[in-house]
Amino acid sequence: MHLRRGYLRQARRLTTATTVLSVLLAVAGCSGSSLGTDHDRRSGTIRIGLLIPQSGVYKVYGPEIKDGFQLYLDTHGGKLGGHPVTVTVADEGDGKQTAVNSGKRLIQSEHVDVLVGTTTVDSLLGLQSMLAEAKIPFVGTGGRASTLKDISRIWHTSWLSREPGAAIADYLRTTVNGPVYAIGPDYQGGWDQVGGFTEAFTSAGGKLANDGGKTAWTPWPGTTNYLPYINKIAASDAKAVYAFYAGAAATAFVQQYAQSGLGSRIPLYGYGMLTDESLLEAEGTAADGIQTVLDYASDLDNDANRAFAAAYAKAHSGASPHLFHVTGWDAALLLDQAIAAASTGGATPTPEAINTAIGKVGQIDSPRGTWRWSSQHTPIQPWYLRKVAQDGRGRANVVVQTLTTLGN
Amino acid sequence: MIATFVATGVDGLAFGLLLFTVAAGLTLIYGVMGILNLAHGSLYLAGAYLAAGMADGGLPALGLAVAAATLLGASGGVLLDHLTRPLTGDQGHLSQALVTMGLSLLAADACTTLFGAAPRPVPPPTVLDGSVHLGAMGYPVYRLAFIIVGAVVAVGLHWMLRHTTTGMTLRAVIADPRMAAATGIRPTRVRTGAFAVGGALATTGGVLGAPILGPAPGIDTTVLALSLVVVVIGGTGGVLTTLAAALLVGQVQTTGVLAAPLAAPFALFTVMVVVLVLAHRTSPQVRLR
């Protein structure tokens, strides 16, 4: 009897544990937090929704996009196109459900005129039908999936997710003497980023070192231990590795790659976020020598970048800006020009008018260099090969060469 | 190929033992009080940030960090014990889960405010840095050292529970709190003690595990979810079943993904379901009927 009661209690506890675990897993997917609930409807005010990661693997990039956007507002009298703006921030999380919930709130409850932000491609994929229904423009600051259906109201100041890999493919094919191992996270962003590389690389005659020529996908976003995958790379005949990881996942991958002793044997190449400046301190010596492809480097030599870097350093005690500061800044810069053009006679433009005006903006004088829209509504821009090295002030991504210009 | 599996198997051992140190604390708290401490991952995260702040590449600093973490974890445990004590009755489990989960959200936000959203570096002590060759594979020395420490913790915990008065008192309270109280044991004091030890295990795991699973936003939920899986698989049977469950989870997460990469995203939960079904089929509770 006593024995039986003990087992029953244990069984009941086990049931509780299982239930709580499933609730926890469900909640983890939709823990949307939000700041700012300003229902400003004064005439003349443009309402901006800023959807950025405040949790999850890409959390580190959220404040960067916001700071870039805010820096533009602060240095331009808090107005875009002559109109005061209210900015409502919501959490993007790891994309998927959190982003959908937050986006829904911004669009349907806050009635924003323009939605700005996102890092992972998943967010926009989940929101595209809602955006189309609301007929408001979206200005993206991060990855753009290759699978979007309708881009008539979708603009990215960042890039197409397939572009970085395509930009570096030819360089790796011609400089690496042998097969290259491709690895990335198992979601649309990874498929696009690594797929852009493998497609351009193999179609030009390059050989992948992966089993059966198939890219290694790691579960997303749950993977924290990359050693099993790295061991598999070590067992292959790879002469180089091309990886796409960003945020906390990038730090883990880079550190474990170095710890496994592979860093000195097989050179690691990747998308720029692998060694993003926000992660370099955490990655430390493990990042040294890694070469990446990106459309920006803090030390780019042009007038806009010098002015931008100086303004950023002034506002943030001497720090240098990163890529996501630039895409955030460019989103505000773009909207400033578009809203100004759409405000005929000082009237407050409708979202539809803003959208039309965005498409007509000719040139954006970005810290990346001047860019204009491609037919895909992303910048036509050059891509750079950068190498992690000491630049006098500390560890940085130093530009090695310009790889190519993409977009048409 | 065999070398790859050996190196990965060793890594599974290291990962499993890391999970064990955290999950053992969770099981202890759960076993003694039936409280599912959803703030357990936050204690790990606190330990990891502590390591990030104190590590300077030397072993003394690591020792000091472990001592500080023990203290921090124990006080955190006592605090959690006092906060959850009034939450009993029919709605007890739900209230406890909500309170500890709320605390973990607050702690996660506090960590981001204090330490920023970027992952923090925790280099292993210089003497344990670098890698050794396991067959043809390189393997981080620190993880090998961690295997030894983890094994010592497991053996120590098992010995403590089986062969010391403290352990027997704990087991008595787990088995039957009323009877234990009747023999003169004070269950409330034992509960506080269990919470303190459980908390200390989590923070210590955080300090020692930081070079493997370092401090970053979201690591608290990762650790908590994996430990909960360990508790669900291992039940509250004791140190040995928790250890077995942790090692199993460790291997599924390492050699598992190497052997069947396509199954990697759901392998862990498949194993959990299989174990739950088998455990239910073979549990004495069913046989008694």
Image (cartoon, coloured by chain):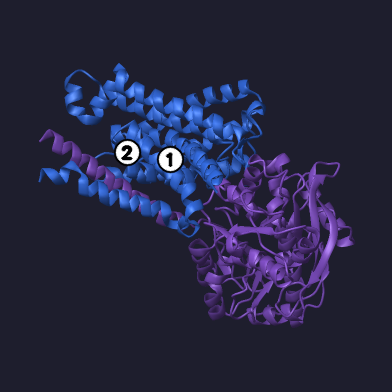
Chain colours: A purple, B blue
Mark 2, secondary structure of its residue:
loop
User: Could you say which quadrant of the image residue A309 lies in?
Assistant: bottom right
Q: Viewer-proximal residue, A201 or B283?
A: A201
Mark 1, secondary structure of its residue:
loop
Quick check: A119 above or below B216? below
Q: Are marks 1 and 2 on the same chain?
A: yes
Q: Viewer-proximal residue, A50 or B155?
A: B155
Q: The C terminus of chain A appears in which quarter of the rendering?
A: bottom right
Residue corresponding to mark 2: B35
> Seen in the image, is B37 located left or right of residue A195?
left
Q: The N terminus of chain A appears in which quarter of the rendering?
A: top left
From the top left corner, tell me how far across and down residue B253 is, in percent: 47, 48
Q: Residues within 10 Å of mark 1 (few under 14, many from 20)?
A: many
The tag on residue B77 is: none
User: Could you say which quadrant of the image residue B156 lies in?
Assistant: top left
From the top left corner, tell me how far across and down residue A222 is, in percent: 51, 52
From the top left corner, tell me how far across and down residue B100 is, in percent: 40, 41
Asked whether the residues under the numbered discs 1 and 2 touch, taking CB atoms below 8 Å apart as contact, a structural biologist would say: no
Amino acid of disc 1: Ala
Residue corresponding to mark 1: B39
> Seen in the image, is A25 located left or right of residue B48?
left
Identify the residue at horizontal 42%, vertical 36% (top origin): B20
From the top left corner, tell me how far across and down residue B67 is, in percent: 52, 22
> Seen in the image, is B276 located left or right of residue A125?
left
Quick check: A323 above or below B86? below
Q: In the rendered structure, the residue with mark 2 lies on which chain? A: B
Identify the residue at horizontal 31%, vertical 34% (top origin): B85
Q: Viewer-proximal residue, A352 or B15?
A: B15
Residue A353 visible somewhere in the drawing: yes
Identify the residue at horizontal 68%, vertical 82% (top origin): A353
Amino acid of disc 2: Ile
